[in-house]
Image (tube, helix red, strand yellow):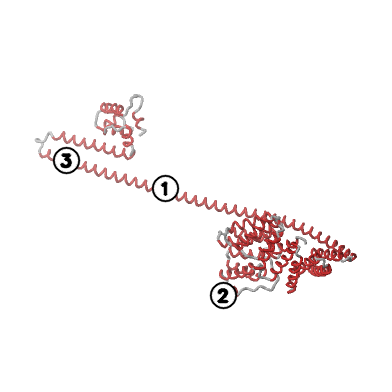
């Protein structure tokens, strides 16, 4: 028995994202029908109800039957103007094109949807949609025999989903198992299929585990998973496929009686309608092989002729060639060499056509792979441009924010500086007013006292003649004291830390020495200092000499003013 029979079933059940069963039309459950009736307005509630209806067919692997609702959702999106719902609608349209085998169109649409979703904020619903997009892309790549690209799409899908969304994760893992099975990494394929089963108990996954065990020639294990598939199967078509696989495995084990029993059971099921013609042809072919193995060549001939008839109706040249060869073998075993030779000539003719078509298909596949890689490269280029544009916008936004922040900080700092300067000026004016007021008060007191003395002198000129020099001295003292106070006040305003720093280095300086330091710091010469202090020039010189000693200046070449300039 040829190994390809089981593998063909694997392709039928696993490579398509949504294999369609040709049974009776699937109707929506009453709950969904009621939900659609309740939400008739053009709003998000209606979109959610329509999406739920589409997902019903999606989960049943019959997405094409949801086209009415997909078209309605597309019309709703035009009214809603919502980016997420636009992406959902375009995704469903891409899936339908993928199911129709319009692969190039579907691939372009999937990339466009992927671009739409990647520009949206990552939420639970966008994560789910991304996972479904990567699922569809992985199935596309598998169909194109582009397994590395398919593997990469699966990994991206699993990464974006994390541990959530078990059903979509299971489908991704199932596709991962298909890739491993295709590459004959059966253990890895089995591990992927089993992990898929943890998230979703689907007959297809059990079938694929069985297929992988069949690849390893572990037929007993394959039978266990085939029986599990039959338990969870919920459609006539699925049960037919699984029963047929079971017959193939029994034939591998050499149990032809059980294999024959399985095929007879399948033939009974395929009589229910013309939609099972393909499976009918496949089952007749395998049943013919079993009959030949058991030596029942007339039955093998009969079954082969039936398969030839169905294959000819389906225009399936590959199966037609196989069945004609089976017929030739049966005729040869029955010693009908002439007809056997005719069948072999017919087989060679059809086989050449098949090989030619296979070569053509292979060339077309290579062309499609090249187109796919070009489309993928174009998509990545566009994606890179979009990302660069987004990064540029972000950088511009950051620069604008930084610029505005700098301007604001500068304005705040400038305002604070102006406020501080204004406050300093106000404080200075307040101190000036206070100082002037106090000085005026002292001046008024002295003037009042002088007036009293002069009045007394005017009234008693003879008795108080000696008071006049004293009055003159008081007036001169008031002038000297005022000059000194004014200097001290304004010096401190200009050099507020001078006395503090000088005292830190020379704590033993007297008040007069500190004041002399201030006068020298103010660049007053000896004569000016003498006039300000109302002393002689020699007295100032002596004071400077004593000050130099107190400051530890022993070198006569060191200028006192230059020394004090550092404070």
- Whichever of labels 1 and 3 marks the residue nearer the N terminus, that label is 1
* Figure check: 126 above or below 234: above
Q: Is residue 263 left or right of residue 346?
A: left
Residue wearing tag 1:
414
Residues packed near mark 1 inside 10 Å, few (<14), some (14 to 19) or many (20 plus)? few
- Whichever of labels 2 and 3 marks the residue nearer the N terminus, that label is 2
Q: Is residue 295 left or right of residue 169?
A: right
Q: What SS does tag 1 mark?
A: helix
Q: What SS does tag 3 mark?
A: helix
- Total numbered circles: 3
Please say if the residues under marks 2 and 1 sit with CB atoms less than 8 Å apart: no
Disc assigned to residue 38: 2
- Quadrant of the rendered image containing residue 288: bottom right
Residue wearing tag 3:
449
Q: CA distance from mark 2 to mark 1?
A: 64 Å
Q: Nearer the viewer, mark 2 or mark 1?
A: 2
Q: What SS does tag 2 mark?
A: helix
* Figure check: 84 above or below 269: above
Disc assigned to residue 260: none
Residue 105 visible to the viewer: no
Please say if the residues under marks 1 and 3 sit with CB atoms less than 8 Å apart: no
Figure quadrant of the N terminus: bottom right
* Figure check: 470 above or below 36: above
Q: CA distance from mark 1 to mark 3?
A: 51 Å
Closer to the camera, 268 or 7? 268
Residues packed near mark 2 inside 10 Å, few (<14), some (14 to 19) or many (20 plus)? few
Residues packed near mark 3 inside 10 Å, few (<14), some (14 to 19) or many (20 plus)? some
């Amino acid at each position: 028995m040829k190994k390809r029979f089981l593998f063909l079933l694997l392709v039928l059940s696993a490579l398509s994202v949504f294999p369609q069963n040709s049974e009776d039309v699937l109707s929506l459950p009453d709950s969904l029908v009621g939900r659609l009736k309740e939400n008739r307005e053009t709003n998000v509630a209606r979109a959610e109800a329509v999406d739920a209806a589409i997902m019903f067919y999606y989960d049943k692997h019959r997405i094409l039957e949801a086209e009415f609702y997909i078209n309605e959702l597309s019309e709703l999106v035009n009214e809603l103007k919502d980016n997420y719902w636009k992406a959902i609608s375009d995704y469903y349209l891409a899936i339908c094109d993928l199911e129709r085998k319009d692969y190039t169109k579907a691939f372009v649409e999937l990339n466009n949807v992927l671009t739409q979703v990647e520009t949206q904020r990552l939420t639970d619903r966008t994560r789910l949609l991304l996972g479904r997009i990567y699922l569809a892309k992985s199935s596309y790549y598998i169909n194109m025999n582009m397994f590395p690209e398919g593997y990469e799409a699966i990994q991206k899908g699993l990464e974006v989903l994390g541990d959530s969304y078990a059903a979509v994760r299971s489908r991704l893992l199932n596709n991962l198992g298909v890739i491993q099975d295709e590459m004959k990494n059966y253990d890895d394929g089995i591990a992927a299929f089993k992990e898929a089963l943890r998230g979703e108990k689907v007959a297809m996954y059990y079938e694929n585990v069985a297929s992988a065990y069949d690849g390893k020639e572990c037929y007993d294990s394959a039978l266990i998973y085939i029986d599990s598939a039959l338990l969870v199967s919920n459609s006539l078509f699925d049960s037919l496929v699984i029963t047929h696989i079971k017959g193939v495995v029994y034939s591998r084990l050499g149990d032809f009686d059980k294999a024959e029993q399985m095929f007879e059971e399948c033939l009974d099921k395929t009589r229910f309608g013309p939609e099972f013609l393909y499976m009918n042809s496949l089952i007749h072919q395998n049943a013919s092989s079993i009959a030949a193995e058991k030596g029942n060549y007339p039955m093998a001939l009969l079954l082969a002729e039936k398969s030839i008839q169905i294959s000819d109706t389906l225009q399936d040249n590959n199966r037609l060639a196989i069945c004609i060869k089976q017929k030739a073998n049966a005729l040869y075993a029955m010693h009908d060499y002439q007809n056997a030779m005719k069948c072999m000539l017919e087989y060679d003719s059809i086989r050449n056509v098949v090989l030619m078509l296979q070569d053509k298909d292979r060339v077309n596949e290579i062309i499609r792979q090249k187109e796919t890689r070009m489309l993928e490269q174009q998509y990545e280029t566009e994606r890179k441009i979009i990302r660069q544009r987004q990064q540029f916008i972000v950088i511009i936004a950051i620069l604008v924010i930084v610029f505005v922040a700098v301007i604001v900080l500068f304005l705040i700092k400038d305002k604070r500086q102006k406020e501080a300067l204004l406050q300093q000026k106000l404080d200075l004016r307040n101190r000036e007013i206070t100082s002037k007021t106090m000085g005026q008060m002292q001046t008024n007191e002295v003037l009042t006292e002088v007036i009293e003395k002069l009045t007394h002198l005017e009234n008693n000129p003879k008795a108080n003649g000696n008071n006049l020099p004293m009055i003159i001295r008081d007036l001169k003292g008031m002038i000297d004291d005022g000059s000194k106070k004014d200097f001290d006040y304004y010096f401190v305003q200009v050099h507020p830390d001078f006395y503090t720093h000088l005292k830190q280095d020379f704590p033993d300086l007297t008040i007069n020495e500190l004041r002399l330091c201030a006068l020298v710091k103010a660049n007053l010469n000896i004569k000016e200092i003498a006039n300000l202090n109302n002393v002689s020039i020699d007295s100032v010189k002596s004071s400077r000499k004593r000050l130099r000693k107190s400051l530890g200046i022993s070198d006569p070449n060191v200028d006192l003013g230059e020394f004090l300039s550092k404070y």
